[in-house]
Image (cartoon, rainbow, N blue to C red):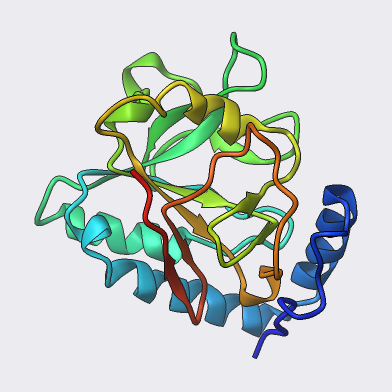
Amino acid sequence: MEPNTSQIMSKKMSRVSLRKTLRALRNELSDSQQQHASLAVRDNLLSLPAITDASSIACYLPNNGEVDLRPFMHACWELNKRSALHTSLPVLHPVCKGHLLFLRYTDKTPMRMNKYNIEEPVLACPDVIPTFHHQVILMPLVGFDANGNRLGMGGGYYDRTLASIQTQTIRPKLIGIAHDCQQVDQLPVQHWDIPVNRIVTPTQQLSFNRA
């Protein structure tokens, strides 16, 4: 079982300190704990109507102890045999610095390492899926609280990318993916932080009412 940090973390901690502490906790998880978390998150996601009703879901590949979504993506590809459900992965935008593109992803997609040493699809314009065409975007995070606030790695890539679609009437559901040990009592937030609609962990599905 993962440790729960919700009682020992405080809003008084800086975002830098929180990132350092939570990343260390996440990296202490054993291989078996990581595998269990990945499968539990897969099952929790597949129980959500927002997932099973979607036709396009943005995912991510794990880095630095993040929950591994590859079992979930394999399940999506199985569903795609019966319905038009596609997965995509984020790619560093080649023109708009600090932004992301999303490219259609399968197990046959050519991959490359980006400047952060994270694997991403080789950029191919026909495979680009506009952000607003997704029904769901699954987002990695470093920390979260019970109010649906998300603490990312600090680069602001998701916040910048998603800011442009926040005024749209129909936009993707944002689901943060985390280990249980990444929960804190209350996150210090900034005005540019975009909260999520839901948090999914191995043991929790937290939902937040957002327009």
In the image, residue 101 lies at what x, y percent?
A: 48, 25
Question: Which residue is located at x 57 percent, y 19 percent?
Answer: 93
Question: Which residue is located at x 67 percent, y 32 percent?
Answer: 156
Question: Which residue is located at x 81 percent, y 75 percent?
Answer: 28
In the image, residue 150 lies at what x, y percent?
A: 61, 52
In the image, residue 209 lies at what x, y percent?
A: 37, 56
Q: Is residue 111 visible?
A: no
Which image quadrant for residue 125?
A: top left
Which image quadrant for residue 120?
A: top right
In this picture, residue 159 sits left or right of residue 40: right
In this picture, residue 30 sits left or right of residue 38: right
35 lies above or below 151: below
Residue furthest to the left: 82
Question: Which residue is located at x 25 percent, y 56 percent?
Answer: 50
Quadrant (top left/top right/bottom left/bottom right) for the C terminus: top left
Quadrant (top left/top right/bottom left/bottom right) for the N terminus: bottom right
In front: 21, or 64? Answer: 21
98 lies above or below 74: above
In the image, residue 107 lies at what x, y percent?
A: 39, 48
Which image quadrant for residue 23?
A: bottom right
Q: Is residue 115 visible?
A: yes
In front: 59, or 118? Answer: 59
In this picture, residue 64 sits left or right of residue 92: right
